[in-house]
Image: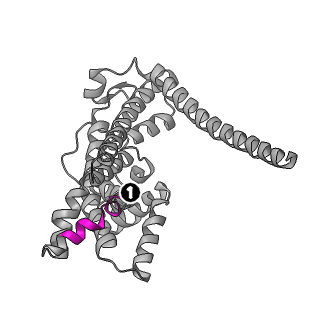
Amino acid sequence: MNLSITLRNRRTYKEYAGLFMIKSGAWIMVALFLSSLGYIAYHGAGTLSPSFLSTFPEKMMEEGGILPCIIGTAILSIGAMAVALPLGIACAVWLNEYAKEGPLKKLITLAVANLAGVPSIVFGLFGLAFFVTVCGLGVSAIAGILTLAVLTLPIVINTVRETLSQIPNSWRESSLALGASKTQTVLRTVLPAALPGILTGAILGLARAAGETSAIMFTAAVVSTTNLPNSPFAAVMSLPYHIYVLATTGMNPDKAVPIQCATALVLLMTVFALNLMAFYIRQKSSKRPA
């Protein structure tokens, strides 16, 4: 009896210790996030204004606003999704609905999983070597869009595959039993049901693309410009790269830090809003009756 009580107490202590470590780690992450957000908001909120969002940088970026950065980030992110979304959906549908179990499917699945873990700087170097140099696109918006499309492709594929796998097989079987072909079943039954997951993948991809610096550093970004891009072959400014430039150009910290923090605040609010939208869509779709 005493031995049983002792073992039970040990298990209880271990459970409490494990739970304490998990909660401590979670609270530490929350504290770090809130402290970083507080620092950025404290130093950047005073600079944030309508004119800051609607004007060009001036006097070596020590004054003015970030309009070309906002436009450039939107062009790169939306353009990347315009390329990655149809490719990602097609790949996910093939893997989930058509591909038979075998070496080819395993190889592609492994490649997608590995691609998701590749550092973004590697994508930037790939874009520089292939899109900028080999394809002759130069440092341009289109080169950055294609690089970001490759980077965000695994996010779209994995999100859409996860959604497709949650659709009941009985829906497919019912459609086939009514005389629909495999393609008709996929287009008229499976994909409409997977629309929330597809939207989630697109939004998460947008958020990832909007926050990337390394992937566009060598392919699309320019330090400063006096004109908005009027061609896909023009270089663009972007919010994350603008923050990087302000941090590495040796500007007067008294002038650089408020602009950096205000720019970071705009980027954080954008990414946070996109992730919140994706979370809302996912939660709403999960409550939908099957």
> For residue 268: magenta?
no
Residue at the extreme left of the image, as rendered: 179
Residue 181: image quadrant is bottom left
Residue at the extreme top of the image, as rendered: 46
- Identify the amino acid type marked 1: Ile
Q: Secondary structure at mark 1?
A: helix
Q: Is residue 188 left or right of residue 153?
A: left
The answer to whether 257 is drawn above or below residue 189 in the figure is above
- Residue 281: x percent and y percent? 30, 44
- Residue 158: x percent and y percent? 38, 60
Q: Where is mark 1, residue-wise? A: 155
> For residue 168: magenta?
yes
Segment colored magenta: 163-174
Residue 287: image quadrant is top left
Q: Is residue 171 left or right of residue 23?
A: left
Question: In percent of the image, x 33 and y 70: which residue is there?
Answer: 96
Q: For the residue carrying disc 1, how many other residues have a C-alpha within 10 Å: few (<14), some (14-19), or many (20+)?
A: many
Residue 61: image quadrant is top left
The answer to whether 77 is drawn above or below residue 252 in the figure is below
- Residue 33: x percent and y percent? 53, 32
Name the colouring of the figure: one colour
The answer to whether 75 is drawn above or below residue 186 in the figure is above
